[in-house]
Image (cartoon, grey):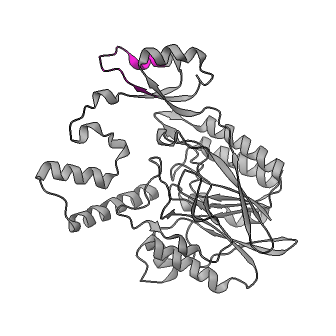
Amino acid sequence: MRFLHTADWHLGRVYHGVSLLEDQAHVLREFVRIAAELRPDAILIAGDIYDRSVPPADAVRLLDEVLTELVSGLGIAVVVIAGNHDGPDRLAFGSSLLTRAGLTVCGPVSAQVQPLMLRDADGEVAVYPLPYAEPALVRTALGDDTIHDHHAALAAQLGAIRASHPEGVRAVVVAHAFVLGGSESESERPLTVGGTGAVDASVFDGFDYVALGHLHRPQRAGSDLVQYSGSLLKYSFAEAGHLKSVNLVELDGAGQCRVEQIALKPRRDLRIVEGTLEDIVAAAADDPGRADYVLARLSDSGALLDAMGKLRSAYPNALAIERPALHGEGEGRAAEDHRRVRIDTLFAGFYTEMTGQTLDEAGSAVLARIVDELEHEGRHA
């Protein structure tokens, strides 16, 4: 049996004030072409379909077009789960009707995880969709007061699946989580503050393949059977060195997997150019990627007049400029870009600067609770 595993589409993403929807539409046309060529038995989309819980109308229309082409046009079963960026109830609207058409959408957490049952020449395969859910929601759904972090929540859900899973049937899990050891990037929203969002890869022991979403770099998570497909596109300059792809998973009758990464070709690359402004502008004439989204890391130390205007005369889609030479070598927060610093770290530094004292363990716990509450309100607003 063959699957295409993808995740973290983040439809409706805006980066440096620029909508990436046309770029997303372009790469999704490439994804549909790959699906049409490979004809997998199912497509697994492991969360963060949208970039925010209330997506723009154009992003909803794009998702509708793509899923219609995959399910109705190509006749491929598709499994979609909510990620931490998605509004689970909105994403799951009409899911009961859509299931009959071959589209399985799981948004809110449920005590009973209903698998999608597929069959090939070697027998049945159960695909278990586990949408992202905060520990409190899982605790309520399962009636288990011992669940206080993401590891315990996912372990309890997977334990319930194991208890009811039919013997001899191959099992695939689709989940959205931060698995310990995974490589993060700045474009991912932390699931929690303080590390309680981390999950150990051992919770997935016994399953034949685990299709993960949340981390944007394609990577394995402790085992070749536990994989992140990575995001659809590069969503920050911290991802400039990433190669974006989808996973083609081949599952044999014995439950052994072979995973192949299939590269995605973006409409425009997102990359970093370095040097003096004069040199960068001069070299652009011979650069085949002049239409790319560019961050210019300038080595100039003196004053520059209309640096962004000059840069955009050479790279019309330039998004940002950095000038490391102006940061100096002194200590302090001035040399840091606050957008790349976690809010708990940022506040702890502010607290120390204001009081002359280090934020203690009790204060850190209070800060983590407040930030988690704000994140929760933001996701469900």
- Residue pictured at 54% horizontal, 59% vertical: 83
Relative height, residue 238 to residue 279 (above, below):
below
Q: Position of residue 182 (x, y in %)?
A: 50, 59
Tell me, yes or no, whether the highlighted magenta stretch contains residue 54: no
Residue 301 screen position, x and y as percent:
31, 21
319 sits to left or right of 205 = left
User: Which quadrant is the N terminus positioned in?
Assistant: bottom right
Q: Nearer the viewer, residue 261 or 342?
A: 261
If the image is split into quadrants, where does the C terminus sit? bottom left
Span highlighted in magenta in the image = 296-311
Q: Position of residue 330 (x, y in %)?
A: 21, 36
Q: In the image shown, does 345 or 368 lie closer to the viewer?
A: 345
Identity of the residue drawn at 60% across and 49% down: 9
Residue 302 visible in the shown view: yes
Number of numbered labels in the structure image? 0
Image point (57%, 82%), residue name: 159
Question: Which sits in the foreground, 113 or 324?
Answer: 324
The answer to whether 237 appears left or right of 365 in the picture is right
